Image (tube, rainbow, N blue to C red):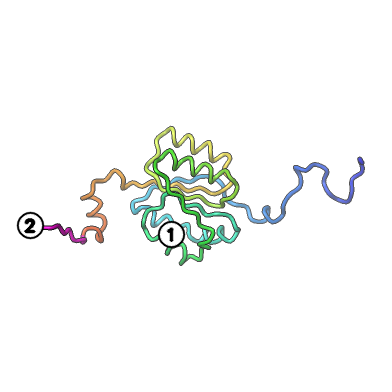
Amino acid sequence: MNTLIGNAPRHPGLWMDMASAAAPVKQGIETKQTANQGLTELTQLCGQLAVLSQQGRWIVLINPPHIGYKQILANANVRMDRVLLVHTKDEVETLWAMEKALTSGTSSAVITWTTPLDARDNRRIQLVAKSALAQGVIIEDVNTHLRDDQLNASNPVAATQLNLSAFH
């Protein structure tokens, strides 16, 4: 039984799936600041997401805001049947969902919208990045600390909305 059959290497750690070796996925986690709820950042990622969605693994969106992301992804030819939406109730669940999606091996990209992270959460993300099996993007919403009147001034659509109330 000690004889080698054919050209196969003996150690199973040397066996390689050639399909996965041909298309390496950029792994790691990137943090981006945004001033428009991640609209620009998502648009920039669309080409990459379209390619990743063809691999048959999930594109996970965690807490996406209402910025028309479905239309943006569809226009970029992202397979919508490979997009998984996750809505969480708080920041703890958001980071947990991101960690699980990045390390499960079933996702090719994970995009998370969140408030700015503190030092402890940043350290946690650095540790997760070491074992990530997918590309991760954290979009930190810088608008969360602005008051409503500042938001309306920066968003002309919101500023032109009518405020109607009942009168007696």
What secondary structure is the stretch in magenta mostly built from? loop
Q: Is residue 165 magenta?
A: yes
Left or right of 147: which side holds 34? right
**Residue 154 percent across, percent down from the top left:** 25, 55
Q: Dot 2, how many residues are within 10 Å of its Cα: few (below 14), some (14-19), or many (20+)?
A: few
Residue beneath the point at 47% across and 34% down: 123
Residue beneath the point at 48% across and 40% down: 96
Secondary-structure class at tag 2: loop
Say if 59 sits above or below 10 in the image: below
* Observer-nearest of 65 and 122: 65
Residue found at the very far front of the displayed protein:
168
* Start-end of magenta stretch: 160-168
Identify the amino acid type marked 2.
His
Secondary-structure class at tag 1: helix
Give whichever of discs 1 and 2 has the lower sequence position: 1
Q: How many marks?
A: 2
Image quarter of residue 157: bottom left
Q: Quadrant of the N terminus?
A: top right
Which dot marks residue 43? 1
Which residue has dot 2 on it? 168
Identify the amino acid type marked 1.
Thr
**Residue 78 percent across, percent down from the top left:** 51, 63
Q: Dot 1, how many residues are within 10 Å of its Cα: few (below 14), some (14-19), or many (20+)?
A: some
Left or right of 69: which side holds 149? left
